[in-house]
Image (cartoon, rainbow, N blue to C red):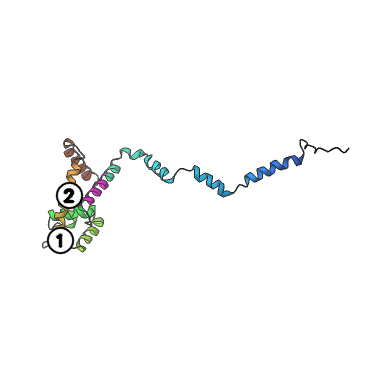
Amino acid sequence: MPTSKKSAAPRRGDPAAARPAAAQASRAQAAPPAAAAAKRVRTAAPVEDVADGMVDAVRLGWFEFATGFHLRKAQEASFAAFKRLVGGIDIRVGHFATLMLIGENPGINQTTLGRAVGRDKSSLTPILDDLVERGLVARKRSVQDRRRYGLTLTEEGEAMRATLAASATEHEKALAACVSPDDLAHFVRILKRIARIMPD
C-alpha cells in the first residue's frame, strides 16, 4: 500500500526559507505613496491652529521694554482709531498735522512748518504737494522775500480742518481715557521731551 510522502520542512539556513519573508518586506516598502500621504494628512494639525499658536507664542524679547517699538505701536493704534472716526475722509498722519498747523499759522513757511511737525524738506514737500493738488492748501509768495512762499488754507482746506478738528476732539477724549488724569500731563511732557531731544 503506497504511503503518502510528507513535504519536508525547510531546513534552517535554506535560502528558499528566506524568500517569503523578503517578499513581504519588499511589498511593505513598496506601499503606495498615496496611502502614506493620506496617513500624514490625517495626523497633521490644521494649518489655522498652527498659525494661531505661532502668533500667540511670539516672544518680544528685546522689544518687550523698547520705548521706540511701543511708541510706534501706540501711534499706529491711535491713528487707526482716528481714521475710524473721520470715516471716508482720505487723510494720513502727516497730512493731518500739516493741515492743522497751517490753519493755526496762516502764512507759515515750509522750513518753520517742518520744524513744528518734525519733518525735513524731503518728507514734507510731497505732503504739501498733495494738499495743494487737492485744493486744500495754497502757496503764496512772501512779500518780504520773493524767494520764499507762505502756506495758507483754501476755503476747502478750512472746511476740511473744521471737520477733522471735531473728530480730533473726540479722539483726544478717548486717548485721555487710556491714561489716568494724574499721569496725563506728565505723559505729554515726556513725549514732548523725546521729540525735542532725540533729533539733536
Task: Name above or below for residue 157 compared with residue 49.
Answer: below
Q: Position of residue 2 (x, y in %)?
A: 87, 38
Residue extent of the magenta highlight: 74-85
Q: Quadrant of residue 174?
A: top left
Q: Residue at x 22, y 45 (%)?
A: 195
Q: Residues within 10 Å of mark 2 (few under 14, many from 20)?
A: some
Q: Secondary structure at mark 2?
A: helix
Query: Dot 1 corresponds to which residue?
Result: 156
Q: Secondary structure at mark 1?
A: helix
Task: Name above or below for residue 9 compared with residue 30.
Answer: above
Q: Residue at x 28, y 43 (%)?
A: 68
Q: Main secondary structure of the magenta part?
A: helix
Q: Position of residue 113 (x, y in %)?
A: 18, 54
Task: Name above or below for residue 191 compared with residue 114.
Answer: above
Q: Position of residue 76 (x, y in %)?
A: 27, 47
The answer to if 76 sits in the magenta stretch is yes
Query: Dot 2 corresponds to which residue?
Result: 168
Q: Nearer the viewer, residue 23 or 130?
A: 23
Residue 28 relative to residue 200: left or right:
right
Amino acid type at mark 2: Ala
Q: Residue at x 21, y 45 (%)?
A: 196
